[in-house]
Image (cartoon, helix red, strand yellow):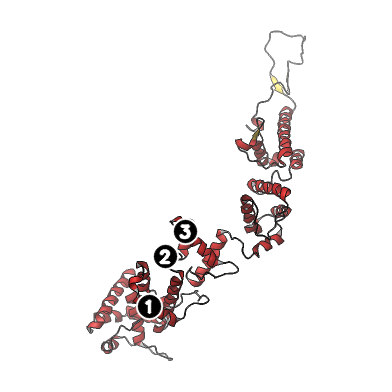
């Protein structure tokens, strides 16, 4: 119950008024009692509140003498001592700190300067625990990557290092008292073999996946001083030992579905190189150091096609995906004279006119493979120019006429795919 609602002695601050008559005064002895009124403008309540504060302050002083601080939690297990709930009393003092008198605030600050810090109390409790360790064993330093420290202290210090720039100035000063000043933090980040927080490692992995479109770098790959290759190798081992996708593994799978394949990592890395050579690098994607050349990946793909029985089913699916990217001419020479007569004439504004047969091959490639235009094979030209011609021929009915014209048998397969593509495009528009 808050102080203002606690009962006080009724006689304090009250007196009986009977028209000025006291004991022995004239007047009817058995008359009606005079009404009781309050005097002193509530000074009795103020004295009671001061008395309760002094009582709590005495318990706080005993706690400081034993533990050296007032950062205790307001829980029954730690806050109640000698029948007094000091933890809850301090929590109430912090919540109503603006109502404390200057003298009362100074008394609490004299016991513990950080009894009411502007940051969470659990942080202050962690700092006091670290301070006690430092007083027994000496200041902490980052020259050995925080090795040799108790696990709880190492985790707490790493958290402070990770979020050092977000800490308040007072928190940074308290960390400096432990030995963890800004110079030591720079020393920690410069340590080559330091253990990185998972969030920091995931950020590096995400940046690598965005830059190269995969998460299967070589074992020696280092990114901005972070050993990404060894870190991913350890993550694969942990997931395989767990026998199920770990939480970290699920986040890595969101970056690259094949980051942990059941076949050699080198095979998967070469697959990505072959895919980029066949479909072109997606926007923003770069080649990684040591990436195989186009000739090497072409020979590799030919080898995989020859050894299909030895591949796993999922590997065969990936090989089929690459084979579908390989562009081969679909229009037969015997069909081209008929098709060229169906193409609508285009105005010529100067410059080099694009080959209409090449443009039609590009349109048929997209219709037959279902790939986006941005992945058009480089051999078929600029995808933007081909896409503009596709939209024009789709709008004026040229592609519809091509799909319904009688052509030799070898061309009937792509005609059916083109007709289905036109129907799909009409349904989505």
Quadrant position of residue 396 = bottom left
Residue at the location (77% across, 41% down)?
110
Res. 239 mark? 3
Towards the viewer: 305 or 119: 305
Quadrant position of residue 418 = bottom left
Q: Position of residue 103 (x, y in %)?
A: 77, 39
Residue 100 visible somewhere in the drawing: no
Disc 1: CA contacts within 10 A as few (<14), some (14-19) or many (>=20): few
What SS does tag 2 mark? loop
Q: CA distance from mark 1 to mark 3?
A: 31 Å
What SS does tag 3 mark? helix
Residue at the location (46% across, 62% down)?
254
Asked if labels 3 and 1 touch by Cβ distance under 8 angstroms, the answer is: no
Asked if labels 3 and 2 touch by Cβ distance under 8 angstroms, the answer is: no
**Mark 1 or 2, nearer chain start:** 2
Q: CA distance from mark 1 to mark 2?
A: 19 Å
Q: How many marks?
A: 3
Q: Position of residue 337 (x, y in %)?
A: 27, 90
Q: CA distance from mark 2 to mark 3?
A: 12 Å
Q: Position of residue 185 (x, y in %)?
A: 68, 60
Quadrant position of residue 204 = bottom right
What SS does tag 1 mark? helix
Q: Quadrant of the C terminus?
A: bottom left
**Mark 2 or 3, nearer chain start:** 3
- Horizontal side, residue 358 vs residue 204: left or right: left
Residue 307 visible somewhere in the drawing: yes
Residue of label 1: 303
Res. 262 mark? 2
């Amino acid at each position: 119950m808050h102080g203002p609602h606690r009962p006080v002695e009724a006689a304090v601050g009250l007196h009986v008024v009977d028209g000025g008559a006291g004991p022995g005064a004239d007047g009817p002895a058995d008359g009606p009692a005079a009404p009781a009124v309050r005097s002193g403008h509530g000074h009795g309540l103020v004295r009671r509140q001061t008395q309760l504060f002094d009582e709590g302050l005495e318990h706080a002083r005993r706690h400081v003498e034993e533990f050296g601080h007032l950062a205790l939690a307001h829980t029954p297990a730690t806050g109640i001592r000698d029948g007094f709930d000091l933890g809850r009393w301090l929590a109430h003092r912090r919540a109503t700190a603006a109502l404390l008198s200057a003298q009362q605030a100074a008394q609490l600050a004299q016991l513990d300067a950080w009894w009411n810090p502007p940051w969470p109390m659990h942080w202050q409790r962690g700092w006091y625990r670290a301070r006690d360790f430092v007083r027994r064993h000496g200041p902490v330093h980052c020259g050995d990557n925080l090795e040799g420290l108790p696990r709880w202290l190492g985790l707490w210090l790493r958290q402070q290092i990770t979020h050092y720039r977000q800490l308040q100035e007072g928190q940074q000063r308290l960390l400096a008292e432990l030995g963890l000043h800004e110079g030591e933090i720079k020393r920690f980040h410069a340590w080559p073999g330091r253990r990185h927080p998972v969030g920091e490692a995931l950020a590096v992995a995400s940046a690598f996946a965005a830059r190269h479109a995969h998460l299967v770098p070589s074992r020696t790959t280092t990114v901005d001083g972070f050993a990404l290759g060894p870190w991913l190798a350890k993550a694969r081992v942990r997931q395989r030992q767990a026998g199920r996708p770990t939480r970290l593994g699920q986040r890595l799978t969101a970056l690259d579905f094949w980051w942990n394949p059941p076949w050699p990592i080198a095979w998967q890395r070469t697959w990505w190189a072959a895919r980029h050579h066949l479909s072109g690098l997606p926007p923003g994607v770069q080649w990684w150091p040591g990436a195989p050349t186009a000739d090497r990946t072409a020979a590799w793909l030919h080898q995989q096609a020859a050894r299909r029985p030895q591949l796993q089913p999922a590997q065969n699916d990936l090989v089929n995906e690459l084979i579908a990217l390989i562009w081969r001419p679909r229009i037969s020479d015997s069909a081209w004279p008929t098709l060229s007569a169906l193409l609508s004439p285009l105005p010529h504004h100067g410059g080099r006119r694009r080959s209409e047969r090449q443009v039609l091959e590009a349109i048929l490639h997209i219709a037959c493979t279902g790939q986006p235009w941005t992945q058009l094979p480089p051999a078929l030209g600029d995808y933007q120019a081909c896409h503009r011609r596709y939209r024009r021929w789709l709008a004026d009915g040229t592609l519809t006429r091509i799909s319904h014209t009688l052509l030799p048998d070898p061309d009937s397969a792509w005609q059916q795919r083109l007709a289905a593509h036109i129907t799909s495009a009409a349904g989505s528009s």
